[in-house]
Amino acid sequence: MADHRMTATSYLVLGLLADGPATSYQLKQRVAVSIGNFWEFAHSQLYDEPMRLADAGLVETSAEPGGRRRRTFTITDAGRAELAGWLAEPTPARTDVRDPGLLKLFFAKWAQPCDVRNIAIDQRRSHQERADHYERTHALLAGSIDRWQLKSIELGIRYERTVEGFWTDLLTELPEA
C-alpha cells in the first residue's frame, strides 16, 4: 500500500463511495446536490483523489473494457476502516469561515460608505438566496436521504439565515445611499 496523506477531500471521496461505487463524474454529481452546498473545493480533485486512494489501497478501481473506459471506484474494507477511524477522531474546535464579504467588512475602513452598503446588500441577498436554496433542497430530499445528511442541510439553513440577519442589521446601522 502506498503512503497517502489523507485530506478532507480524501474523506469526502471515501464517504461518498461508502454509499456505493461511482465514477469520478458520478462523484461530481453527488457533490453537486449535497456536500457542494457547504464545502468548497476544486472538483478536479474528484478525478485525481480516487486514483490516489486506489494507490493507497483504500479504493478499488475497475475500467470499462471498451468505449470510454470509464473507471468506477469502490471503497475497500481498508477504506471503510480509514473512514470509520476519521469519524471517531475528535473534530478540531475551530471552524473556518472563508467569507469574502466578511473579509471586505474587516477592511471597510478603507472603503467608501456606499461601497460598504453595497457589500451588505450583496451579502444579505447572497445568504438569503443560499438559505432559500437549502430550504428547497431540504423539502425535496426529506425522506430520501439519511437523517444526518438532512441535519447538515438544517444547519446550513440556520447558518445562512443567521448571517442574512447580521447583514440586515448592519444595513440599518449604515447611512442611506
Image: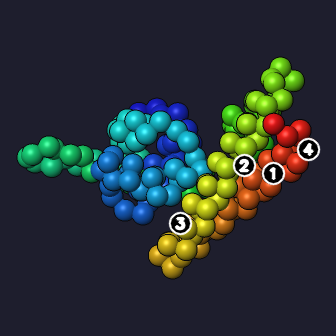
Q: Which residue is mark 2?
A: 124
Gap between marks 4 and 2 measured at Cα:
14 Å
Q: Nearer the viewer, mark 4 or mark 3?
A: 4
Circle 4 Cα neighbour tier, 10 Å, few/some/many (<14 / 14–19 / ≥20): few
First in sequence, mark 4 or 3: give its number: 3
Q: Position of residue 157 (x, y in %)?
A: 67, 62
Residue at x 67%, y 50% (from the top left corner): 125
Circle 1 Cα neighbour tier, 10 Å, few/some/many (<14 / 14–19 / ≥20): some
Q: Which residue is mark 3?
A: 137
Gap between marks 2 and 1 measured at Cα:
6 Å
Q: Which residue is mark 4?
A: 173
The front one of 28 and 168 is 168
Gap between marks 2 and 3 measured at Cα:
20 Å
Gap between marks 4 and 1 measured at Cα:
9 Å
The front one of 140 and 84 is 140
Quadrant of res 44: top left
Q: Secondary structure at mark 1?
A: helix
> Which residue type does callout 2 highlight?
Arg
First in sequence, mark 2 or 3: give its number: 2
